[in-house]
Amino acid sequence: MPRRPLPAALATGDQPDPTIELANRLNSAAIHLLRRISRDDGEDGVTGARLSALSVLVYGGPQTLGALARRERVATPTMTRIVEALVRDGLADRSAVVGDRRSVLLTVTDDGRALMERGRARRIERLAGELAAIDAERQADLARAVDILELLEADTKE
């Protein structure tokens, strides 16, 4: 895979900072990997924006509309349209927030959870097929790299 050039704001001097270069490579590889393994995500007839919002509800738990919009980095009216479609399709439910009649709490339905799990299973199967094509030594290297990535994730939760 060709190396992506560093963004101009990070490209300083003749010798790039090794940590910045590693971050650049990891960023590019992660984006390409996610695009490749998620290419069938629309198979269930749900748009990417709806799947993303549904994923937050499945893996992050019930959310208010405002919180979901912030997590997805979209305006509240945009999220309202996404949620309306999820509710209409039976993938999410909305209910009033106790003590705040203006807020709405969104939860995932059993059908919504099942849809997310099917998509996740497809992505994992696709990735497992790709991993099966590499030798055991490289798989072990990758397992160690994933251990490190999981440590980075744990550090951000503290």
Image (spheres, grey):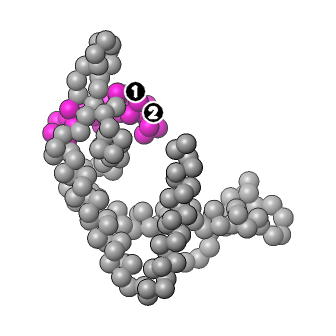
Magenta residues, start to end: 64-93
Residue occupying the point 32% across, 30% down:
80
Q: Is residue 36 left or right of residue 1?
A: left
**Where 85 falls versus 94 (above or below)?**
below
Q: CA distance from mark 2 to mark 1?
A: 6 Å
Q: Position of residue 48 (x, y in %)?
A: 33, 50
Query: Which corner quadrant of the image does residue 107 belong to?
Result: top left
Q: Position of residue 86 (x, y in %)?
A: 23, 39
**Where 108 falls versus 133 (above or below)?**
above
> Tag 2, which secondary structure?
helix
The front one of 44 and 156 is 156
Q: Which residue is mark 1?
A: 66
**In the rendered structure, which amino acid carries the disc numbered 1?**
Gly
Residue occupying the point 52% across, 71% down:
144
Q: Residues within 10 Å of mark 1 (few under 14, many from 20)?
A: some
The front one of 52 and 59 is 59
**Where 132 falls versus 68 (above or below)?**
below
Q: Is residue 82 left or right of residue 11?
A: left
Tell me the quadrant of the picture where the C terminus can be found.
top right
Q: Point out which mark residue 91 bears.
A: none
Q: Point out which mark residue 70 bears.
A: 2
